[in-house]
Amino acid sequence: MAEQEQKLWYVLHTYSGYENRVKENLKSRAHSMGMEDYIFDAVVPQEEETETKNGRTKTEMKKTFPGYVLVEMIMTDESWFVVRNTPGVTGFVGSHGAGSKPAPLLSEEVDHILHSMDSTTANYNMDLNIGETVKIVDGAFAGLEGKVTATDDEHGKVKVEVDMFGRLTETELDYNLVQRI
């Protein structure tokens, strides 16, 4: 395979929980081994998550893809060797083994991941109870009140039953579109 002379993003598989350590190890190794012209950046995709339980709001960063690190690099035999042999890296995603080089991420994928990291949109977990009355604050049902019929904390969703045109209708909303009454 001919070596590429353009910097592209690749995905590394790591031991779960070691993503930030791998990121720092990569940056350190790139510097100490004189590979700054080939290994440019390492990113652990994260999102800010806000959770409200018992009246307390807590914000923390959650890894978007646990066990994975993105690395921006020019793929050469030397840079591939340095990255692949960084402590905590178990391999490249998209490599077919037997010494084959991995496939880079598409630019649209990278743009989407990096944009979502920069986004200030947070996931809200409100610790809502089934049967609780909430007010919808935004979207097509804004201003309506309804009863919570189901919650999905993992995906930040809540199902609310509202009275529309004299008929009960269930709708699924993001937590940040409802508020307690």
Image (cartoon, rainbow, N blue to C red):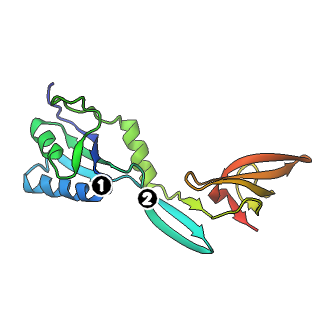
Q: Residue furthest left?
A: 33
Nearer-the-camera pick, 71 or 128: 128
**Which label was assigned to residue 163?**
none
Residue under the image location 7 percent in, 51 percent down: 34
Kind of residue at disc 2: Lys
- Secondary structure beneath label 2: strand
Q: Residue furthest right?
A: 166
Is the Cβ of the residue at disc 1 closer than 8 Å to that at disc 2?
no
Kind of residue at disc 1: Glu
Task: Answer left or right for 22 relative to 35.
Answer: right
- Secondary structure beneath label 1: helix
Which picture quadrant has residue 99? top left
Which picture quadrant has residue 60? bottom left
Residue under the image location 58 percent in, 56 percent down: 153
Residue under the image location 18 percent in, 32 percent down: 4
Nearer-the-camera pick, 40 or 170: 170
Specify few, some or many for label 1: CA neighbours under 10 Å numbering under 14, 14-19, or 20 or more: many
**Which label was assigned to residue 19?**
1
Q: Residue furthest top?
A: 1
x then y, percent, for residue 175: 63, 57
x then y, percent, for residue 124: 58, 61
Q: Quadrant for the N terminus, please.
A: top left
User: Does 134 appear above or below 166?
Assistant: below
Q: Which of disc 2 and disc 1 is earlier in sequence?
A: 1
x then y, percent, for residue 166: 92, 47
Q: Mark 2 points at which residue?
A: 62
Tell me the distance, in whole angstroms, between the alpha carbons under discs 1 and 2.
12 Å
